[in-house]
């Protein structure tokens, strides 16, 4: 029955998928293929182009600087998984619960930073972190917490932490709304039954909501990985990758190789590398989540 | 209600349709017998903080346009940072405009890729103009002997110490230090009075190298070392003299000469600290003279004077020298037709000739050529002080203009670490040398 | 009141207080920027947190005079809205096919689209530029729209596909049995039911088109075509010494988004609830 209704015929299928596929292939896949092509050359940006085989990739694999930037992306992902998805989920649960007042207000306000451009967020947080005119130091001084003042963006060991906070801050609302959509699509009857059975809200969250939100969680984890593997603007504006290269992320490294160093072939290899690593991370995360889901 | 909404939607749709169909415009406008010249530059129109070059460019260009109605310009103006990204993309796509601005460190790459051609014919067609340029103005743009790839509009030192004499007085310092020992003592004295001795905004990564190390390095190594290095004739970054200069810079940082957030504020913010009276000095190029004249309050301005870094013990360089050069110059597309080339020659001559130089100088700038008779009273005291100083010193190479980009990248990023003590001078020198030897 | 009740009260208070604190954390930096942009430079330097004694609009006047924001603004509105409409339609159709039909290329196609989420655009600026040059489509508004649609598809398809999958098939089946064709069924049944996902996709793709910078920078040449982020960098770069002016410049890009957001907020959330109830 079902099969006969949803039996694919070429005509409708082409009409449905065609426009998206053509656009995607021409403007996303073709540039990637071009980048792949360039990555096999030593190329400084014009006719001076010589075939290099896999040399760029061989260099990439042993490029400690590249792996250090990858480490920064991993740090960011870990931080965002806990911060964004964790807090986002918690907020979504609270908004769906009974105890919280002013739900509309919270929902609207917490999502709001998502609509601001990353460049603006970067500028804004540079001003928040500023040593002399920054909001943060002003508040800490006001609260008598001078001891908490740090050289936020000037200390290589902790710069990634402080550079990550704005990213987490901005996108918590996105994950909150994702989870809200997920929670609201769960049949309320399930909750009612659980409540009659005397399950506490924490138990309900753990045993009912979370398992039913497995798909949403997968989506959230994937968005989190994908977004943070290619992150650029926030950090570019706040630190420019410094001090030294301590807050440089992969996309910035690729950009640097192109626009500072004129190493266009190598930079293309980095871009391809970023995509391969991202794909690997997402497949790994799916595997992990599936394993947990099956338990 | 519904009708209004429908009307608004209809209106919006019509506007959208009109805008979408107007897309072909820039291509449809083919030259109607006119010479059409494409030109991209970084003199931003209506810039509220316009510097002397900007203030020279617009009136000169406007006059040229009205004098030459047969030439049509397709101009794109943008700010500096976006200019660099855009030009490198255009270069990679072989889409450079007819006329643009080039930086010394881009030239080798653009030549390799056949994107530019020498501007010698332009200069040689107007000997009076060619010979009006100051000595050394073309140095950064010369390749293979005498091929010139850029025509400069400015010539200045990238290193100057802007200092507040009143603050120095308060710390008991009468005149600007003449030796390195005195300089270090002055820093301690200023610090004891609660001032940041030198405000530094090195977020952009080039300030420490271009405005400080290029000069400090030369104090220790002397210029012959640099030329030997540049021309690959034996000098190394790991040579003890260069390491000493890194060491001196790091010592300054360790004794608290700079603000602690030096890597997270930029070159504009270092001026802000100085203008607000929090710091006693900052080091920047001469381009900041016109900025200071327009933004600094009178009470700061009247105490602001110029100096250069003092002599260092055992230094091989001339203590009466500072890194200097032209930075940018007008360059032409390799495929420029003779017809366009002629027009561009006239335009660039107007933009960099004695009259333009007069406007630049009267706006407290530093033109590349000698200026026509100008009104000295228009100059700010700081400008006069600059010209007095420059008359006494010689220019030494600016690192980021003369060395290739990858080496500079490593050096600049490394200096950020050097200044916060996370790399030793010796290790940094080795790191730069390793990049240098890659080629 | 029972002890249980008091515990609830305390718990409720803690929950409300901490979420309120968090909301303020989200909003305050923007409010701070908003009112600081009405201060003079000197006033700001004296006290960074106080309210402006007499609000000054000079910073905004400067930003508009210098930035010519109206041109950039119109361009951004046009490019972003056309892109969003195109993304929603193209992604919705493709997602329906991917969610409902079983065919050999289904999984590979889905993975292909989704992998688009991983593309680091800053690394592809030069290939994209060269592509558009070959197509003779440089300095063209349509190029930008096509790019925004293409790069918006992965997220849109990702969100639509999973949402459509969660919609029960019964209503479609009924519709087909009634003799309605594919597109009629899509329009009458699936499209309205997918409204929550639609709202999310709309706002997210509008955002990315509204804020996109690097493609617009390298592909556009004429001032008449340039978009708001380009305009913003053009003058924010010149205002960095002057925090209050910079804040005014930043506010100019935030405020339109803020208006769009708070106006369409009800629709977004209503769409979400409607979607949940219908199931």
Image (spheres, coloured by chain):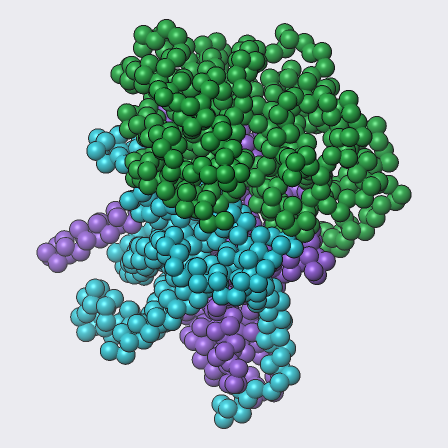
Q: Tag count in the figure? A: 0
Left of B286 or right of it: where is B338? right
Q: Between A154 and B391, which is closer to the camera in this rendering?
A: B391
Residue C67 location, quadrant = top right
Q: At 40% across and 18% down in the image, what residue appears? A: B311
Question: Residue at 61% across / 11% down in the picture?
Answer: B379
Instruction: Left or right? Give the position of B36 relative to C97.
Output: right
Q: Is residue B90 left or right of residue B234?
A: right
Give the side of residue A92 with respect to residue B16, left or right.
left
Rendered residue at 54%/19% (across/down): B394
Q: Is residue B172 at least partly visible in the picture?
A: yes
Colour green maps to chain: B
Q: Nearer the viewer, residue A3 or C112?
A: C112
Residue lying furthest left: C3
Q: Which chain is purple?
A: C
Residue B328 placed where, x, y %? 61, 33
Q: Position of residue A171 (x, y in %)?
A: 39, 53
Front residue of A122 and A241: A241
Hue of chain A?
A: cyan
C196 and A49: which is toward the camera: A49
Residue B57, compared with residue A37, is above or below; it is above
């Amino acid at each position: 029955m079902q099969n006969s209704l949803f039996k694919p015929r070429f005509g409708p299928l082409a009409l449905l998928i065609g426009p998206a596929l053509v656009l995607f292939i021409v403007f996303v896949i073709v540039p990637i293929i071009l980048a792949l092509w360039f990555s096999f050359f030593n190329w400084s940006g014009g006719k001076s182009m010589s075939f290099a085989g896999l040399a760029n990739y061989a260099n990439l694999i042993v490029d400690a600087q590249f792996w250090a930037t990858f480490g920064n992306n991993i740090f960011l992902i870990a931080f965002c998984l806990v911060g964004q998805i964790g807090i986002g989920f918690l907020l979504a649960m609270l908004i769906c619960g009974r105890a919280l007042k002013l739900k509309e207000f919270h929902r609207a306000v917490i999502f709001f930073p998502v609509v601001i451009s990353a460049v603006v967020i970067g500028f804004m947080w540079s001003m928040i972190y500023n040593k002399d005119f920054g909001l943060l130091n002003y508040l800490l001084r006001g609260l008598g917490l001078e001891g908490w003042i740090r050289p936020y963006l000037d200390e290589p060991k902790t710069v990634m932490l402080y550079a990550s906070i704005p990213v987490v801050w901005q996108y918590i609302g996105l994950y909150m709304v994702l989870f809200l959509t997920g929670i609201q699509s769960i049949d309320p009857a399930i909750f009612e039954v659980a409540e009659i059975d005397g399950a506490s809200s924490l138990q309900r969250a753990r045993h009912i909501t979370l398992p039913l939100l497995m798909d949403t969680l997968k989506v959230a984890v994937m968005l989190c990985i994908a977004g943070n593997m290619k992150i650029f603007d926030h950090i570019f504006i706040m630190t420019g990758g410094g001090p030294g290269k301590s807050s440089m992320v992969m996309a910035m490294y690729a950009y640097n190789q192109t626009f500072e160093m004129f190493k266009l072939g190598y930079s293309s290899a980095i871009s391809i590398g970023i995509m391969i690593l991202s794909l690997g991370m997402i497949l790994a995360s799916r595997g992990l989540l599936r394993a947990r889901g099956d338990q | 209600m519904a009708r209004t909404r429908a009307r608004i939607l209809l209106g919006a749709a019509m506007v959208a349709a009109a805008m979408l169909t107007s897309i072909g415009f820039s291509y449809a406008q083919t030259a109607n017998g006119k010479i059409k010249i494409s030109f991209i530059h970084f003199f931003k129109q209506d810039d509220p903080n316009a510097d002397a070059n900007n203030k020279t460019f617009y009136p000169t260009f406007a006059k040229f346009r009205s004098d030459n109605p047969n030439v049509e310009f397709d101009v794109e103006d943008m700010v500096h940072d976006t200019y660099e990204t855009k030009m490198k993309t255009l270069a990679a796509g072989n889409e450079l405009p007819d006329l643009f601005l080039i930086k010394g460190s881009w030239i080798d790459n653009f030549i390799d890729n056949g994107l530019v051609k020498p501007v010698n014919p332009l200069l040689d067609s107007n000997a009076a103009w060619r010979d009006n340029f100051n000595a050394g103005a073309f140095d950064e743009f010369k390749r293979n002997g005498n091929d010139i790839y850029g025509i400069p509009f400015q010539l200045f030192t990238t290193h100057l110490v802007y200092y507040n004499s009143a603050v120095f007085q308060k710390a008991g310092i009468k005149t600007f230090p003449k030796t390195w020992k005195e300089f270090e003592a002055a820093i301690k004295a200023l610090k004891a009075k609660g001032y940041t001795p030198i405000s530094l905004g090195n977020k952009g990564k080039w300030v420490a190298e271009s405005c400080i190390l290029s000069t400090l390095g030369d104090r220790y190594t002397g210029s012959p070392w640099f030329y030997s290095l540049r021309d690959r004739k034996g000098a190394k970054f790991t040579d003890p003299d260069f390491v000493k200069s890194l060491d001196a810079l790091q010592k300054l940082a360790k004794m608290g000469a700079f603000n602690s957030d030096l890597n997270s504020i930029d070159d504009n913010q270092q001026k802000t600290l100085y203008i607000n009276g929090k710091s006693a000095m900052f080091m920047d190029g001469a381009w900041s003279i016109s900025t200071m004249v327009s933004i600094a309050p009178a009470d700061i301005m009247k105490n602001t004077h110029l100096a250069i870094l003092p002599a260092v013990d055992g230094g091989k360089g001339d203590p009466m020298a500072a890194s200097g050069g032209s930075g940018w110059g007008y360059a032409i597309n390799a495929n420029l037709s003779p017809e366009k080339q002629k027009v561009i020659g006239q335009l660039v001559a107007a933009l960099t000739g004695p009259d333009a130089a007069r406007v630049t100088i009267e706006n407290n700038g530093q033109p590349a050529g000698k200026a026509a008779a100008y009104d000295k009273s228009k100059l700010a005291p700081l400008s006069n002080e600059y010209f007095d100083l420059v008359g006494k010193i010689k220019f030494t190479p600016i690192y980021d203009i003369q060395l290739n980009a990858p080496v500079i990248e490593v050096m600049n990023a490394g200096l950020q670490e050097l200044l916060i003590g996370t790399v030793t001078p010796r290790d940094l020198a080795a790191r730069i040398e390793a990049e240098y030897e890659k080629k | 009141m029972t002890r249980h009740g008091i515990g609830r009260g305390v718990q409720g208070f803690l929950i409300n207080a901490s979420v309120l604190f968090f909301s303020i954390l989200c909003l305050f930096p923007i409010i701070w920027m908003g009112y600081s942009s009405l201060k003079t430079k000197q006033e700001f330097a004296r006290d960074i947190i106080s309210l402006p004694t007499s609000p000054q609009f000079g910073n905004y006047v400067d930003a508009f005079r210098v930035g010519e924001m109206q041109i950039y603004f119109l361009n951004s509105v046009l490019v972003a809205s056309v892109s969003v409409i195109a993304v929603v339609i193209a992604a919705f159709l493709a997602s329906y096919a991917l969610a409902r039909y079983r065919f050999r290329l289904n999984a590979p196609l889905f993975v292909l689209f989704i992998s688009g989420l991983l593309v680091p655009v800053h690394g592809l600026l030069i290939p994209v530029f060269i592509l558009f040059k070959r197509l003779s489509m440089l300095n063209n508004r349509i190029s930008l729209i096509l790019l925004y649609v293409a790069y918006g598809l992965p997220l849109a398809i990702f969100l639509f596909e999973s949402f459509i999958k969660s919609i029960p098939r019964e209503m479609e089946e009924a519709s087909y049995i009634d003799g309605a064709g594919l597109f009629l069924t899509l329009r009458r049944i699936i499209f309205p039911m997918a409204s929550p996902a639609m709202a999310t996709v709309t706002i997210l793709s509008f955002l990315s088109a509204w804020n996109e910078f690097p493609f617009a920078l390298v592909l556009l040449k004429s001032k008449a075509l340039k978009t708001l982020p380009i305009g913003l960098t053009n003058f924010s770069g010149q205002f960095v010494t002057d925090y209050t002016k910079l804040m005014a410049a930043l506010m100019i890009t935030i405020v339109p988004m803020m208006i769009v957001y708070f106006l369409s907020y009800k629709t977004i959330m209503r769409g979400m609830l409607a979607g949940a109830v219908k199931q």
